[in-house]
Amino acid sequence: MSNTAGFRFELKQLFHLMWPILITQFAQAGLGLIDTIMAGHLSANDLAAIAVGVGLWMPVMLLFSAIMIATTPLVAEAKGARTPERIPVIVRQSLWVALVLGIIAMLVLQLMPFLLPILGVPESLQAKAGLFLHAIGFGMPAVTMYAALRGYSEALGYPRPVTVISLLALVALVPLNYLFMYGIGPVPHLGSAGCGFATAILQWLMLITLGGYIYRAKAYQSTQVFRTWDKINPDLVRRILKLGFPIGLAVFFEVSIFSTGAIVLSPLGDTLVAAHQIAMSVTSQLFMIPMSLAIALTIRVGMYYGEKNWIAMRHVQKLGLATATFFAICTMSLIWFARPQIVAIYTQDPAVFNVALYLLLFAMAYQLMDAWQVGAAGCLRGMQDTKGPMWITLIAYWIIAFPIGIYLARVAKMGPAGVWLGLIIGLCIACVLLLARLHSNNRKLSAQTP
């Protein structure tokens, strides 16, 4: 490949990776959307309980599964460096790491319900939220191992199998949720907590399906992961963790600041928590667009990083950020013009409806900054720079945004608007710092001889 990739070629490559990943991200986010919608049709109390449960589960799940994102740049680098024999070794060690991390995450979630009284969650929500956390925790080993295999498949340029599995899971979740929420035959009526059991079962089914496909499909035979099995390689495990742990923490710092909003607001009543959860659910769906582009950028940047083709790497970055800007403008327009129709999907409760409608204005305000910061983070991961983004997200979200959000929500009596203003401030700071770091890294690499 030439040093300067053509605009059309690189855009085609990005979109070839992005669209299946986007469908996958929408489908996986749709799992939470289905939970929220089905719980919302039970009662405001059920919706609030799910909001609290998801607020604790989501950061833990993303912390541990995001560590396995390290598989993607490592496989992409090996592919770009023309060393395919390294790929199955990397993935097998990633699976070892994923198994151990999944078990740890499962144990953490079993302890989470005991924190609910300490966090000030109302007693009326504790039973349902606690049972949800106990149940969904059993799916965590499947979540982390699936993340490792997904990173392997997407880095090779095969995102479609993961997409198909995610869409099938979306369809399967509805009857599974119904079974455990309403109870059929020997299965008891569990209300919104039943979503936890349904999701855990679904995660294991997804892992088995993806593993079976990779084992049989011809596309994976040259780098077949399951042809043999390796013992744990401490050196490679350390490299995976050194690269992946900062990614996991960075994702944790960002997602947890969003998810904990429901906990911060829980003493203020079910209506505000339910409205906040609706607005957060909508933005979570829209976030899948820049997130999918960021994953595609990680793969493309990682390949050029392996080739040491700095010119093509910078070209991809600029193209990716320009594309992120276009999509952010589209999502802002969608929120502005379709807010009532969007909120109506979730609830018909007038009080919840009006607050959610108002909160979506804050969501619209941060779309551009959110797209830029996640795009810059995706580029940095492709360059295997993960520690810097970790510290940036810690400072932006937890040292600055979180205290501001609590102060505005509870002390200044702004309620949910205070939480969302804190989020906007954190996103703006993270965006500026991540883009500055990306620019600095590019300058350092440009000074080197390819």
Image: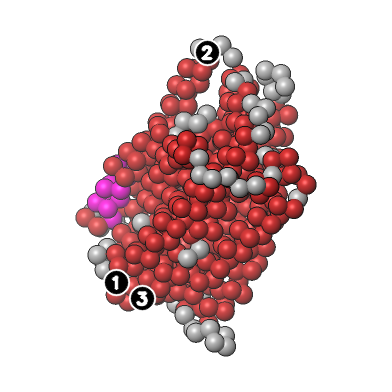
In the displayed structure image, the side of residue 129 where residue 305 appears, left or right: right
| Visual colour scheme | secondary structure
Identify the residue at image location x=34%, y=68%.
113
The residues bearing labels 3 and 1 have C-alpha atoms spaced at a distance of 10 Å
Q: Amino acid at mark 1?
A: Pro
Image-based side of 220 in relation to 122, left or right: right
Residue 103, compared with residue 15, is above or below; it is: below
| Quarter location, residue 93 | top right
Percent from the top left, x then y, of residue 259? 40, 56
Residue 187 appears at what percent x and percent y? Answer: 53, 83
Return the residue at label 1.
122
- Decide: is 29 above or below 9: below
Residue indicated by mark 3: 127
223 vs 439, nearest the viewer:
223
Residue lying at 47% horizontally and 22% vertically, measured from the top left: 441
Q: Earlier in the sequence, mark 3 or mark 1?
A: 1
Residue 165 position in % (x across, y down): 67, 58
Question: At numbered mark 1, what does the secondary structure look like: helix, strand or loop?
Answer: loop
Residues at marks 2 and 3, CA–CA distance in whole angstroms = 58 Å
Residue situated furthest bottom in the rendering: 185
Q: Is residue 92 magenta?
A: no
Foreground: disc 2 or disc 3: 2
In the drawing, does residue 431 fall left or right of residue 154? left
Mark 2: amino acid = Gln
Quadrant that contains the N terminus:
top right
Range shown magenta: 400-409
Report the residue at 51% width, 44% height from top.
232
Q: Which residue is mark 2?
A: 448
Q: Position of residue 12 (x, y in %)?
A: 72, 34
Q: What residue occupies the far right of the structure in this picture? A: 218
User: Alpha carbon of mark 2 to alpha carbon of mark 1: how far?
Assistant: 58 Å
